[in-house]
Amino acid sequence: MSGRPDWLPFALGSACFAALTALFGKLGVAGINSNLATFIRTLVILGVTAGIVSLRGEWERPAAMPWHSWAFLLLSGVATGLSWLCYYRALQLGPVSKVAPIDKLSVAIAIVLGLLFLGERPSLPLLVGGGLIVAGAMVIALG
């Protein structure tokens, strides 16, 4: 067993791609409606994801999936769509260097939600790190 968690490369990839999302999104919404930009982005994500699922042979019959998976994935999709709509509008109106850090407050909010609703256990590093994320976002936003 290695000392590195299996999820770490994917989390780092997510962070890098999220940074590119902010940069490319800011450039992409210039001069067009932010809701249309979000729609175009969504179509691209749909195509890329469908291609990956197809190449990996990971399609499943929808009826074989548990109802609670459907319910929570639908709720997650609604939350994602609303997040993206807000994010692209914020990028259109503000500098990426301020919008992106405020968007990352989602990390601290997710920590709180995990503690409250998923029974995750608080630890000193988790609480300090979450607090630092909030403090950093506030310093950037107010500076």
Image (cartoon, rainbow, N blue to C red):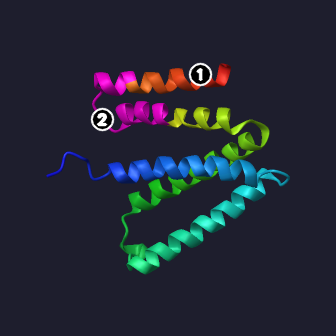
Viewer-side label of 1, 2: 1
Q: Which residue is mark 1?
A: 138
Please indicate whether residue 71 sits to the left or right of residue 121 in the image. Answer: right
Mark positioned earlier in the residue sequence (1 or 2): 2
Residue at point 51% right, 24% down?
134
Q: Look at the image and say whether residue 117 sits in the magenta stretch.
A: yes
**Neighbour tally class for label 1: few under 14, some 14-19, many 20 plus, Cα within 10 Å:** some
Start-end of magenta stretch: 107-128
Residue drawn at x 45%, y 79% is: 54
| Type of the residue with mark 1 | Met
Q: Residue at x 74, y 57 (%)?
A: 37
Which numbered marker is on residue 27? none
Residue 119's disc is 2
User: Label 2 sits on what residue type?
Assistant: Gly
> Residue 75, relative to residue 66: is it above or below?
above
Magenta highlight on residue 111: yes
Separation of residues labelled 1 and 2 (CA atoms): 27 Å
Q: Is residue 48 left or right of residue 130?
A: right
Q: Position of residue 101 (x, y in %)?
A: 59, 33
Depth check, front residue: 70 or 21: 21
